[in-house]
Amino acid sequence: MLWSVVIGLWTVVAVVGLLAWEAYRLPDIGNLDRHTRAGAVRLVGADARMFASYGPMHGDPLTVDELPKHLIQAVIATEDRRFYEHPGIDPIGVARAAWTNLAAGRVVQGGSTLTQQLAKNVFLTADRSFERKVQELLLAFWLERQFSKDEILSIYLNRVYFGAGAYGVDAAARKYFGIPATRLGLMESALLAGMLKAPSRYNPAVAPELAGARTSVVLANMVDAGFIDQKTARAAASQPIAIAGPAGRGSGARYFADWVYDSVPDFVGRPASDLNVETTFDPGLQALAERAVAEGLAGARRGEGLQAALVALDPATGAVRALVGGRSYGDSQFNRAVQARRQPGSTFKPLVFLAALEAGWAPSDAIDDAPIRIAGWAPENIDGKFEGRITLAQALSRSRNAATVRLQEAIGRSRVRSLAERLGLSGPLPEGPSLALGTGEASPLEVAGVYAGIANGGRAVLPYAVTAVRDRDGQTLYERSGSGLSPVVSPRSAQALVGMLAGAVQNGTGKAARLDRPAAGKTGTTQDYRDAWFAGFTADLVTVVWVGRDDGSAMDSVTGGGLPADIWKRFMMPAHQGWPVRPLIGSGGDKTTLAETR
């Protein structure tokens, strides 16, 4: 009997000593409300909705009273039904979980309370050691003594991970549904509550069927707990899962997002706080652009290995509305719309004709489309023929190489080079006569800027995407001001060129790009079919499409008037649906900008 008492006393001493030692080794628990973390960057489109984020995303801190009642009920019913009754640990819940696991022959249910989960998520690691479990229990008791039940639940919901980089229920609501957590409906609340078990596994953007099944389980739990009736649960479960936040965006939007994100330090440096970046991104146009590229490449003859890029911007301002940098962001994050520099080919020719117009020539003036040799170099036309005496308008519409080079030599290469630089081509341009045929290099984004300068009547455009950068508190760190547009050619010359480019679409090499409204543009094909382009515009939108291979190898006779023009039309036709038909710049009509018609 004596030895039993002694052993019992020493056991108590050992347990108390162990608890004291583990309590001494606990991490700092005095700063639960002073949560520090790396800053995140949220990108917001022209529709004021977030379409991408970088870094861990944290939403607005909310209290239980501010959150929908059904969200709290969904979490309680599924994660810790006796939350408001236990002191931090739930012996009944542990016993129930142990019995369920024993009956199943495997671990199918956990016994941790929400308070224990909060202790583990905030202070401890995911280590499954005995020491970590003891510390978790001690922290759970401490949390229950320091905070009310509602405060614990609020802190938990503001900190817990929901997958896709979203920490906290408000961040999750914005990430998956594009709304604050205060506006969550029953089905959405049940879905998020179900994700707590395994955020990646039940991510509705990745596994909608699993997420739907898990949502039904949560709704059944709410019925079992008496929070809702069976009819309400069935109605909620029948609702389709609609991912409206950035988690559901097509991966192609990441090309646009990466381009913007990489440019943020140019505006505000690298602040440690969260940033909200307001952009020109149009999600509707972006979806159309991605579909046009995908469908165009899918239907291409011998299209294996082909890549494509598309840029669409407002000619009045230079605001980029949509951007596709390749056929698959998942396969390659290289942004061909911004980073790739390729020969523009005949899409450069309009600059030669514009320089001639500035020098006093007229579209009706004649030029010889005849053999020409300069220092041993003799350009040929793509069809191997020469048309003789033709007008400048005909030469551009039919993309005659010999006539274009002859025109350049007549007005002087320096005029062409200077004009190209003023309109926004930043790369080095060739010194030789091949300059006229686009043998320099440019990105699709630069080409789009050049064509915007033509489309708007001769004002230089710098394509841009960022309109403002604000911190988490709404303080403005950067805001775009001024148009940044300056005249570089006379409106009369620009208007004359627009008319010539309209002829190229109506009767020339760009016929495949005809729309149901006035449009102008130019095809481009480089030597050996290494690059194929179509650059064109309406009164509201400039769009440039490039097709080629990353290694610069030849394509199977792909010309600018073929696949690129097809992709361009696939995008531009639905993009203009519902917009008023307006004449091109210089042919009369109002001067309403795209921003005012969208």
Image (cartoon, grey):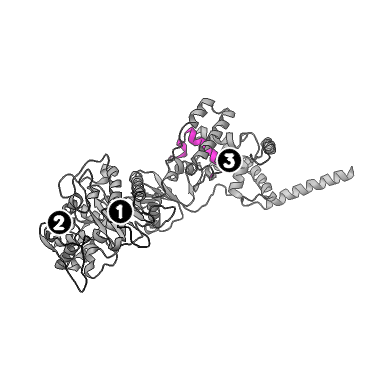
Which label belongs to residue 545? 1
Secondary element at image label 1? strand
Is label 3 or label 2 in front? Answer: 2
Disc 3 to disc 1, how far (Cα)? 54 Å
Under circle 2, the secondary element is helix
Residue farthest toward the bottom in the current orientation of the protein = 375
Q: Is residue 476 in sight in this rendering?
A: no
- Is residue 193 one of those drawn in magenta? yes
Residue 323 x/y as whole percent: 34, 51
Instruction: Return the x and y of residue 14 as percentages of the image width and height.
Output: 78, 49
Q: CA distance from mark 2 to mark 1?
A: 23 Å
Instruction: Locate residue 322, reporting x and y percent.
Output: 33, 49
Magenta-colored span? 179-199
Q: Is residue 224 above or below residue 325?
A: above
The disc labelled 1 sits on which kind of residue? Answer: Val
To which quarter of the image does residue 464 belong? bottom left
Secondary structure, mark 3, is helix
Q: Which mark is residue 152?
A: 3
Q: How many marks?
A: 3
**Residue identified by numbered label 2:** 394
Q: Is residue 125 above or below residue 527?
A: above
Q: Residues within 10 Å of mark 3 (few under 14, many from 20)?
A: many
- The mark that comes first in sequence, 2 or 1, is 2
- Pick the residue in front: 320 or 202: 202
